[in-house]
Amino acid sequence: MKRCTKSCSIDLSTKIQSEKVCNMQKVAAREIRTAKRKGKREAAKTFDIAPEKVETLKKLSTASEVLLEKQSMKENPV
């Protein structure tokens, strides 16, 4: 019995190629997940503000709005 080495080698190369593609897809998916996690961690670090700071910032913005209104009223009296 003769074996067809040509078709066997084609099947083997196809299998190897499909495994390589599968591995590449896994690596890409892993890199995407890692990038998302890293991005979330960086965002959490950036926006990690203590509640006291938030209150202080709100008060400052309110005070600056009041000052701007007073200035505009002084400049343009009705």
Image: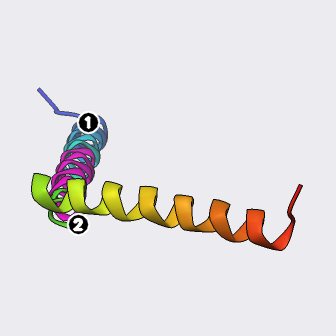
Given residues 45 and 63, the one toward you in this image is 63
Magenta span contains residue 40: yes
- Mark 1 vs mark 2: in front: 2
Numbered mark located on residue 11 in the image: 1
Picture residue at 11% right of the left edge, 57% below the top = 52
Residue designated by label 2: 46
Locate residue 10: give its quadrant: top left
Please provide the residue range marked out in magenta: 25-43
The C terminus sits in image quarter: bottom right
Locate residue 42: give its quadrant: bottom left
Given residues 20 and 53, the one toward you in this image is 53
* Majority SS type along the magenta span: helix
Q: Residues within 10 Å of mark 1 (few under 14, many from 20)?
A: few
Q: Residues within 10 Å of mark 2 (few under 14, many from 20)?
A: few
Picture residue at 16% right of the left edge, 32% below the top = 2
Q: Position of residue 74 (x, y in %)?
A: 76, 70
Locate residue 11: give its quadrant: top left
Q: Secondary structure at mark 2?
A: helix
At label 2, which amino acid type do we have?
Thr
Given residues 47 and 4, the one toward you in this image is 47
The N terminus sits in image quarter: top left
Lower position in the chain sequence, tag 1 or tag 2: 1
Magenta span contains residue 23: no
Look at the numbered discs 1 and 2 and tell me whether their residues touch, using CB distance below 8 Å: no
Picture residue at 24% right of the left edge, 35% below the top = 4
Q: Secondary structure at mark 1?
A: helix
For marks 1 and 2, give the CA distance: 52 Å
At label 1, which amino acid type do we have?
Asp
